[in-house]
Amino acid sequence: MCSPVPYNSTMKVTFLLYGFCLFSANALDSKDAVITISSQSNNYHYLLAENLKNDILKQARDFDQVVPIVHVSHIDFPHVGGWAILPLIPYLRKLHHGNCSWFFFMEDKTRIRLKKLIEVLGKYDYNKEIWLGHAIQDREATIIHHFAFFEDPSAFKYPNAASGFAISAALMERLENRWKARKPSTSDFSIDYAHELALFIWDNNKGPTLKHDPSFCVNEESSCASFPVPFKLCYTSVPKSSIYFAVKTYEKFHKDRVTVVKNTWGKHAEFINFFSNVEDKSVPTISVGVPNTEQGHCEKTLAILKHVGEDLRKFPSIKWIVLADDDTILSVTRIQELLSCYDNNSLIAIGERYGYNIYNKNGYNYITGGGGIVFTSALLRQLISSKICKCPTISSPDDMFLGVCLNRLKVDITHSSLFHQARPMDYAPEYLENQPVVSFHKHWMIDPVSIYIKWFADADASIRSLQHSEL
Ligand SMILES: *[C@@H]1O[C@H](CO)[C@@H](O)[C@H](O)[C@H]1NC(C)=O
Ligand SMILES: *[C@@H]1O[C@H](CO)[C@@H](O)[C@H](O)[C@H]1NC(C)=O
């Protein structure tokens, strides 16, 4: 039996209810696996995780009366870097005393068939250092993986995290030891946790590589033990009149990048403004009165948000602000759909989460700017009126600074994997499959108009025809 070492009071309750993790001599059953759902404090995501947990417990009761331990990560382990998994390992090991056979990790969009999952895990020896998942590979060296393995990026396998993955008890023990012994680093960026975890486990060939098992699926099929489900609209799409797009640009890009925005997704936006260092009537742009900086743009971005704040007074229908770069490629319709799941009166910021130094005390999460950042109008008002959100320097990185600022305002950012800081070819195809992607970023060695047409044009056009036929 695992001895209960509660992490906090919530944990204690969980433990009394389901705190057993016995080794069965032969076949595994559900209580041999500890399941951790990567969850978020935002209401919509919290609900997804809670429903998922209840579903797993129900499945367990339906087939063998024993319930597995299911952790909802942001409640059970409120660690700023919990989403990156590694910081959870010592807590999980402490709670379960190295005495459970398997640790299974999943996202709030992952679904599992518990009985099948237990069968699959039972085929492998948890006393060996192994981990299992749906293995994916990069097709080319990519910035989101720090251009790792640039000679042959496809040689390295990492899990499609939304398919779920399992780590054996033996491997967890090794990982805990290495994690505790690691040298603290002070400038760590966390981007794609699945890849970063795989690198840590692989440990320059001293540790195991991911073992691919086809029961961990990318698409739902009857043979799957786990698979991701695509995003579902929550009620109806939010109206276009409730979204304000603020595009950050600079005089050098008014001709090319801004033209692309205007010819693609910009056409579908009801409120859109281009903010630049100079006024250019041909776009038109609004000058924010802040000189351009090579990198950073902290002052410029805050000036944009202040200007938007003024506009909000004139247009009370606006509930959402999307801050985008002039080389962000996105779908207005997909954003309208996505936002149907979020409360427009709460303090919310949504986008692709990156982490800075999240393994240390002073770390924080932020939303990476290139993929677009969505704020509720309520949060934007707080941001611009708050005294604690002043740029350290004019050229501090704006998206990181917004992360610091939200952290000070005690607002958790909300991660959505539908936003992307990089180009489609920077992600493994499986990662993008079957999901209504919201954005990509950068006009580097690609034709942005083709990317828009391939990924977003149909979505943006279909809602239009829908609206026309409704009239
Ligand atoms: C694991 O469980 C077994 C059987 O209940 C027990 O004998 C052993 O001491 C436990 N090991 C740890 C590390 O808790
Ligand atoms: C804002 O949210 C409320 C409550 O969910 C909803 O009734 C309303 O239609 C939303 N407003 C907009 C503009 O989406």
Image (cartoon, rainbow, N blue to C red):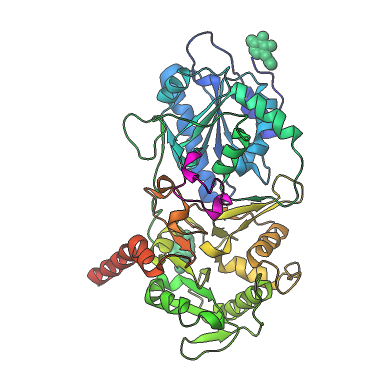
Quadrant location of the C terminus in the rendered image: bottom left
Extreme residue toward the top, this view: 25
Rendered location of residue 214, percent (x, y): 39, 30
Rendered location of residue 381, percent (x, y): 63, 71
In the rendered image, residue 466 lying in the magenta stretch gets the answer no
Extreme residue toward the front, this view: 151
In the rendered image, residue 146 lying in the magenta stretch gets the answer yes
Camera-side residue of 372 and 129: 129
Rendered location of residue 397, percent (x, y): 67, 66
* Residue 256 in sight: yes
Rendered location of residue 96, percent (x, y): 65, 23
Q: Is residue 9 left or right of residue 118?
A: right
Does residue 146 sit above or below 384 in this rendering?
above
**Quadrant location of residue 116?**
top left
Name the residue: 51% across, 76% down. Answer: 316
- Magenta span main SS: loop
* Residue 159 in sight: no
Extreme residue toward the left, this view: 469
Does residue 339 sit above or below 427 in this rendering?
below
**Quadrant location of residue 22?**
top right
Name the residue: 52% across, 17% down. Answer: 125
- Please state the quadrant of the image where ligand 1 appears: top right
Name the residue: 48% across, 35% down. Answer: 164
Q: Is residue 10 left or right of residue 55?
A: right
Name the residue: 54% across, 11% down. Answer: 24
Camera-side residue of 312 and 336: 336
User: Which residues are drawn in magenta?
Assistant: 138-156
Camera-side residue of 350 and 418: 418
